[in-house]
């Protein structure tokens, strides 16, 4: 499951089945009328986010290009090298979102390099905004640093 921050709520309701509850003497059990006949509890995921259990990530992102100049219509794709790091506590549901201008198209993630992480990225369009959304980890743990290459045609 992706959402590790929202607690899981467990609800239980109980009642007596008076048809089968009688013992050998014919006495039937009763419930305390001042006690609710249901119970609700929450189970929290262990987040490893310090004593307060509140995650305080410190994400930093930088980008470098493999080209100094970009020419529209050039056959050479543009590769952006993205460096993402977390110097704080775990970052849950961490994503990199890149808005793409109309002149560019997302080709994919660079996968032929040992030095680069193989991110899971998806192309999305929301309200006429074209985006590439990449999963950085769930969680992106404290001290994590990754390099990834994203290719675009222009």
Image (cartoon, rainbow, N blue to C red):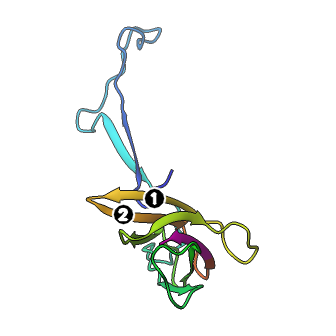
Q: Nearer the viewer, residue 6 or 82?
A: 82
Q: For numbered disc 2, what is the local secondary structure?
A: strand
Q: Position of residue 26 (x, y in %)?
A: 39, 8
Residues at marks 2 and 1 touching, judged by CB atoms closer than 8 Å? yes
Q: Residue furthest left?
A: 34
Residue drawn at 31 percent across, 28 percent down: 31
Label 2: how many residues lie within 10 Å, few (<14), some (14-19) or many (20+)? Answer: some
* Residue 61 in picture, x, y percent from top left: 49, 84
Q: Which mark is residue 123?
A: 1
Report the span colored magenta. 148-154
- Of 17 and 102, which appears nearest the observer? 102
Taking the spot 35% from the left edge, 44% from the top edge, the residue there is 40
Residue picked out by circle 2: 130
Relative vertical location of residue 15 with respect to residue 138 in this rendering, above or below: above
Asked if residue 46 is positioned above or below residue 82 in the image, the reply reads above
Dominant SS in magenta: strand
For this orientation, the residue located farthest to the bottom is: 68
């Amino acid at each position: 499951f992706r959402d590790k921050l929202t607690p899981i709520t467990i609800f239980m309701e109980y009642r007596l089945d008076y048809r089968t509850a009688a013992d050998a003497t014919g006495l039937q059990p009763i419930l305390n009328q001042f006690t609710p006949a249901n119970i609700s509890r929450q189970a929290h995921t262990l987040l490893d986010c310090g004593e307060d259990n509140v995650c305080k990530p410190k994400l930093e992102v930088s980008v470098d290009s493999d080209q100094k100049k970009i020419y529209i219509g050039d056959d050479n794709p543009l590769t952006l090298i993205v460096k993402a790091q977390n110097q704080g506590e775990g970052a849950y549901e961490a994503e990199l979102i890149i808005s793409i201008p109309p002149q560019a198209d997302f080709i994919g993630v660079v996968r032929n390099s040992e030095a680069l992480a193989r991110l899971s990225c998806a192309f999305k369009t929301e309200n006429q905004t074209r985006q590439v959304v990449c999963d950085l980890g769930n969680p992106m743990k404290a001290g994590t640093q990754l390099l990834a290459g994203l290719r675009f045609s222009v």
